[in-house]
Image (cartoon, helix red, strand yellow):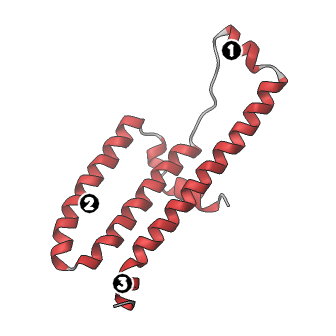
């Protein structure tokens, strides 16, 4: 279940080293480029726009998975936080929270991947039903 997200993370590993603001800049810049391309492509044929959005969704998924798998553990420095974090209950809660966070990420990843696949196949579906 982790194979595709980890493969995307290795392919987009450049973004694991870029700051979050820089990553947002890349995404915003690519969004502007996509909007310009939509204007050009829609003049040629309207059915070619959906695969372009599919490519953008795959780009966003790659960046998200690279950022997700490059997370570093949080180092607590406050004495009260260290005291609370060293208890067994907080360790159990942290394990459950980590598993839950990974499950939510995987569900979102595969949901978006399914959406990208539908966008990619949308022109074929439109042509087959017309």
Dot 3 or dot 1: first in sequence order is 1
Position of 19 relative to 1 (above/below):
above
What residue sits right under mark 3 in the picture?
126
- In the rendered image, which residue does mark 1 sit on? 81
Q: Residues within 10 Å of mark 3 (few under 14, many from 20)?
A: few
Q: Residues within 10 Å of mark 1 (few under 14, many from 20)?
A: few
Residue in the foreground of this view, choosing between 40 and 115: 115
Classify mark 3: helix, strand or loop.
helix
Circle 2 SS class: helix
On the image, the x and y values in percent for residue 97 come to: 70, 37
Q: Position of residue 55 (x, y in %)?
A: 38, 65
Circle 2 residues within 10 Å: few <14, some 14–19, many ≥20? some
Badge 2 vs badge 1, beta-carbon distance below 8 Å: no
**Image quadrant occupied by the N terminus:** bottom right
Residue at the image position 19 percent from the left and 60 percent from the top? 36
**In the displayed structure image, the side of residue 11 where residue 83 appears, left or right:** right
Q: Earlier in the sequence, mark 3 or mark 2?
A: 2
Residue located farthest toward the front when viewing the structure as drawn: 130
Q: Quadrant of residue 116?
A: bottom left
The residue tagged with tag 1: helix, strand or loop? helix
Name the front one of labels 3 and 2: 3
- Closer to the camera in the image, 13 or 2: 2
Quarter of the image that includes the C terminus? bottom left
Q: Does residue 80 appear to the left or right of 72 in the view shown?
A: right
**Real-space CA distance between mark 2 and mark 1, rounded to the nearest whole angstrom:** 45 Å
Q: CA distance from mark 3 to mark 2?
A: 22 Å
Query: Is 41 situated above or below 75?
Result: below
Compare residues 84 and 75 and report the one nearer the observer.
Answer: 84
């Amino acid at each position: 279940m982790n194979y595709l997200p980890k493969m995307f993370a290795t392919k987009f590993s450049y973004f694991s080293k870029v700051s979050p603001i820089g990553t947002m800049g890349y995404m915003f810049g690519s969004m502007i480029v996509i909007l310009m391309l939509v204007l050009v492509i829609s003049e040629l044929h309207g059915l070619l726009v959906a695969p372009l959005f599919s490519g953008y969704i795959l780009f966003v998924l790659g960046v998200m998975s690279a950022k997700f798998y490059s997370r570093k553990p949080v180092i607590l420095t406050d004495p009260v936080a260290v005291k609370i974090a060293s208890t067994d209950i907080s360790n159990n809660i942290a394990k459950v929270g980590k598993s839950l966070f990974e499950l939510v990420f995987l569900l979102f990843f595969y949901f978006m991947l399914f959406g990208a696949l539908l966008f990619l196949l949308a022109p074929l579906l439109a042509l087959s039903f017309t």
